[in-house]
Image: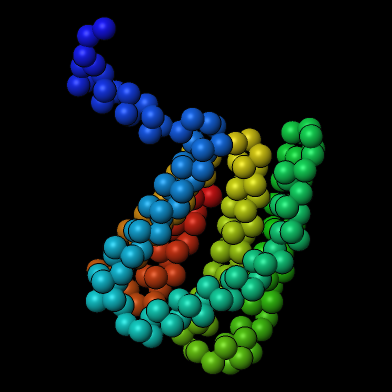
Amino acid sequence: MGAVKPWERQRSMIRSLKPKSEFSHNVITLMTGTTLAQAIPIAISPILTRLYTPEDFGVLALYMAVTALVSAIATGRYELAIMLPKNDVDAANIVALTITVTSMISLVTLSVVMIYNTEITLLLGNPEISNWLYIVPLTVFLTGVYQSLNYWSNRKKHYKRLSTSRVLQSGTGAGASLSMGGAGFSSGGLIIGQIVGQSVAT
């Protein structure tokens, strides 16, 4: 037998590095997307800290805390059941139910904000958050829909779509924050950046 050619050896090495199972391939796909999505904010953080003040980041953190609190109950946790049915039609009905519940909670949240905006602002202790409270229902709705579709994509094994959505959320959100910060926006630029990224990902 003749000697193995260099290019054949390289091709053999490349084949050996490829995932040998569907599970490994899916894990690598999700890990790649998650890593890129986390790397983008880290990469642009030195620029953002020059465009925005610590107070602006404080308003963003307060906004995210409020939305996270409401979003925790927005779907009624029905999205956890999307993976359970054997029939896709039943699972799709649960997705529809989850989005319906999210819509109702978002409308209730909007009503509460419109009626008790002043009281909530005083409770949070930051006057700058007042106007942004009206956007909380939108973020809650997007979060609920995203979670529902996330579980549906998991069920259908659309891992590349999941990975892409995470990168898009991080990338577009970062781009919007940078653009608005360059245009002279304060905390609103950070909040709108989050909403833009979440909308694109959803």
Residue 121 image point, x, y percent: 57, 87
| Quarter of the rendering containing residue 82 | top right
Which residue corresponds to the image point at 40% horizontal and 79% vertical from the top-left?
57
Q: Residue at x 22, y 9 (%)?
A: 2
Q: Residue at x 73, y 52 (%)?
A: 80
Indicate the quadrant where residue 191 lies: bottom left
Between 11 and 2, the one nearer to me in the picture:
2
Residue drawn at x 33%, y 29% is 14
Residue 148 drawn above or below residue 93: below
Decide: is 121 above or below 161.
below
Left or right: 42, with 102 as reference point: left
Image height of 87 relative to 65, above or below: above
From the viewer's perspective, is residue 60 above or below residue 101? below
Residue 4 coordinates in the image, percent (x, y): 23, 16
> Dividing the image into 4 quarters, which one contains the N terminus?
top left
Image coordinates of residue 132 in percent, x first then y, are 51, 75
Can see residue 184? no
Q: Is residue 27 visible?
A: yes
